[in-house]
Image (cartoon, rainbow, N blue to C red):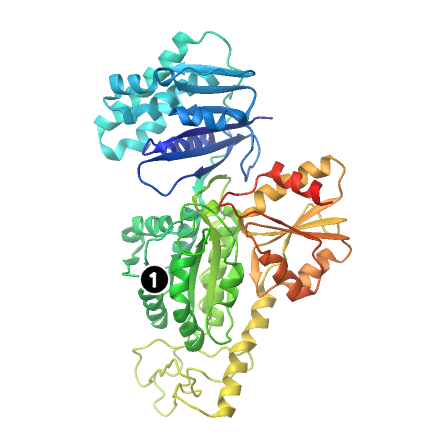
């Protein structure tokens, strides 16, 4: 089985992201599954950045710790990552930037920058030269690379396309002419099967929002949420969507509340710092019972923190954000397939229960790319629920926006209809929507709103268990830790450990009955989370009173790897 990891390192501005995306597309077309991730510094130029591509014969959802091929666009990359190489790993580096050697590694020196200047007329073409050399060393068809380069740079004009092609050919020809010895890392073409797509977490969120009827997006750029806005903005003319770059996050949340109040499906996306500014608006949506969808893409805090790295530190913040008590739902997808279903569910539940729904992601999820077999569009629905025009021509009837119902859900009409007036207020209000200070009405309205919480809980799917429940040891995870945890479980089970994983993607209202059922016979329970205080463990104990044996935590801004989880579990047992 093929399982090859390629790492590309260099300085910001040298095109690591371009290389990783092109390679991901290239190997996906060759019949493989791909997972790509990036580790970048928060600067435009300089610093050390890298992208990592894992190529596998079967679906893959996480990084590998060991590297088969290292493409070093600068000297620092070799020094930092040489110790990560597998036995007989391959390092491609610029021969004019130094000479490297080491035991158990195959070094391939290539004049990357010189070839880029000679054939691509710019040293920025160094990444295309490296790609060409990689095609020869791995035995992968170079013609596929040429086709992908044409597609990727076609919009920039033929001159840019030709310079990239010339650079890639130069790298390929140099490697073919200079390196006679066999490269130990070969990746052959697989037999043709079904077509697959390469998609990032941000793209699947934006795509599904559009499929779910999104018509208004307002947001302020804040990494790692910005690519969601960029994707939706790139499709706004095709799907008749209004995209507004607001002056700040306070404006963004109030814009989407206003749009949703008129019946328009609306969304915003931000990170923890931006969400902090939105909190008062979240309470406004709770009081006015306005359906909105908010994506919170986590990064390490507090304050600016690590703006380009990952963390799961906002779980409890999103569950409790807002003054006062009101219902909401919080989802945390761990794979593109989960995100595809959950974003659609977020819009439908927001409309049905007239509440805010928060989709909790992080930098690792948003910026990574996966190979996906397909998405079933038949699973997407647009359900508007309690929206009615039955009072349209009834002059004698007074419409009650906050009518007290058994379900707590009041029928909506949209502003602008004849004969009826909608009253809505951020103060406590009567059924008609008028301000009140009545203690009796206050009690009824609080209870009306909170009735929805248990109904929402009943609509949440059972948590995902792998490979089965009630193992001796169960690892509880949520969100983007899914892939690394699943692979770690496979490794530990092969070692004879009776261990399983319970993954939460529909986190709140907490699915306590499902969790208790799956863990009822487990002797040891761990949580796995990218934060410092064990927020999932606290939520689990609060909701179920289950005792968590230990917490496997990581908060250095980097995602978990499967071998790291294996080591941490073995140390804890």
Which residue carries the number 1 mark?
Answer: 249
Nearest the viewer among 469 and 89 is: 89
The residue under the point 56% across, 53% down is: 532
Secondary element under disc 1, as helix, strand or loop, is: helix
Residue 436 visible in this rendered orientation of the protein? yes
Residue 139 visible in this rendered orientation of the protein? no
Q: Where's residue 39, x and y in %? A: 44, 38
In what quadrant of the picture does the N terminus appear?
Answer: top right
Q: In which quarter of the image is residue 520?
A: bottom right
Nearest the viewer among 333 and 96 is: 96
Q: Is residue 201 left or right of residue 18?
A: right
Q: Where's residue 409, x and y in %? A: 50, 77
Q: Where's residue 475, x and y in %? A: 67, 49
Nearest the viewer among 342 and 225 is: 225
Q: How many numbered callouts?
A: 1
Q: Where's residue 265, x and y in %? A: 38, 64
Crowding at mark 1 (Cα within 10 Å: few <14, some 14-19, many 20+): many
The residue under the point 44% across, 42% down is: 199
Q: In which quarter of the image is residue 247?
A: bottom left
The residue under the point 52% across, 65% down is: 319
In what quadrant of the picture does the C terminus appear?
Answer: top right
Nearest the viewer among 119 and 461 is: 119
Rendered view: 226 above or below 493: below
Rendered view: 30 above or below 454: above
């Amino acid at each position: 089985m093929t399982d090859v990891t390629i790492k590309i390192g260099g300085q910001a501005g040298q095109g690591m992201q371009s290389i990783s995306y092109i390679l991901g597309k290239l190997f996906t077309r060759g019949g493989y599954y791909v997972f790509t991730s990036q580790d970048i510094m928060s600067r435009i130029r300089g610093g050390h950045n890298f992208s990592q591509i894992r190529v596998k014969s079967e679906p893959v959802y996480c990084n590998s710790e060991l590297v088969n091929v290292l493409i070093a666009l600068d000297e620092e990359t070799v020094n930092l990552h040489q110790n990560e190489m597998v036995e007989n790993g391959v390092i491609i580096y610029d021969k004019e930037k130094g000479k490297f050697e080491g035991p158990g590694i195959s070094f391939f020196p290539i004049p990357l920058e010189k070839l880029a200047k000679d054939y691509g007329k710019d040293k920025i073409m160094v990444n295309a030269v490296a790609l060409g050399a990689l095609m020869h060393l791995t035995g992968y068809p170079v013609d596929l690379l040429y086709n992908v380069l044409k597609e990727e740079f076609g919009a920039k004009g033929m001159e840019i396309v030709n310079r990239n092609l010339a650079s890639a050919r130069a790298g390929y020809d140099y490697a073919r002419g200079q390196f006679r010895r066999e490269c130990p890392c070969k990746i052959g073409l697989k037999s043709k099967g079904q077509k697959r797509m390469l998609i990032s977490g941000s793209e699947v969120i934006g795509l599904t929002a559009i499929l779910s009827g999104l018509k208004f997006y307002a947001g302020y750029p804040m990494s790692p949420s910005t690519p969601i806005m960029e994707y939706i903005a790139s499709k706004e003319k095709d799907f008749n969507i209004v995209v507004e770059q607001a002056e700040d996050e306070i404006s963004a949340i109030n814009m989407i509340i206003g749009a949703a109040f008129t019946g328009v499906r609306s969304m915003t996306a931000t990170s923890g710092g931006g969400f902090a500014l939105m909190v008062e608006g979240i309470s406004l949506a709770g009081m006015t019972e306005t359906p909105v969808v908010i994506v919170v893409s986590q990064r390490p805090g507090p304050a600016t923190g690590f703006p380009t790295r990952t963390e799961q530190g906002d779980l409890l913040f999103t569950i409790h954000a807002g003054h006062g008590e009101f219902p909401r739902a919080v989802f945390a997808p761990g794979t593109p397939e989960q995100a595809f279903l959950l974003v659609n569910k977020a819009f439908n539940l927001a409309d049905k229960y007239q509440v805010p729904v928060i989709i909790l992601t992080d930098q690792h999820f948003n910026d990574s790319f996966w190979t996906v077999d397909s998405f079933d569009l038949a699973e997407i629905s647009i359900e508007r629920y309690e929206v009615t025009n039955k009072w349209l021509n009834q002059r004698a009837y007074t419409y009650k926006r906050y009518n007290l119902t058994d379900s707590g859900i009041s029928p909506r009409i949209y502003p602008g209809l004849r004969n009826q007036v909608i009253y809505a207020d951020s103060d406590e209000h009567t059924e008609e929507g008028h301000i009140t200070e009545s203690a009796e009405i206050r009690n009824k309205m609080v209870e009306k709103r909170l009735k929805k919480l248990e109904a929402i809980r009943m609509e949440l799917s059972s948590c995902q268990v792998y490979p089965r429940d009630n193992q001796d040891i169960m690892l509880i995870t949520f969100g983007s830790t899914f892939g690394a945890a699943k692979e770690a479980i496979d490794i530990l089970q092969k070692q004879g450990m009776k261990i399983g994983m319970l993954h939460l993607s529909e986190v709140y209202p907490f699915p306590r009955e499902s969790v208790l059922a799956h863990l009822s016979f487990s002797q040891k329970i761990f949580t796995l989370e990218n934060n410092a205080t064990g927020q999932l463990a606290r939520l689990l104990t609060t909701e179920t009173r289950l005792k968590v044996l230990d917490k496997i935590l990581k908060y250095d801004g980097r995602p978990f790897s499967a071998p790291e989880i294996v080591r941490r579990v073995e140390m804890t047992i």
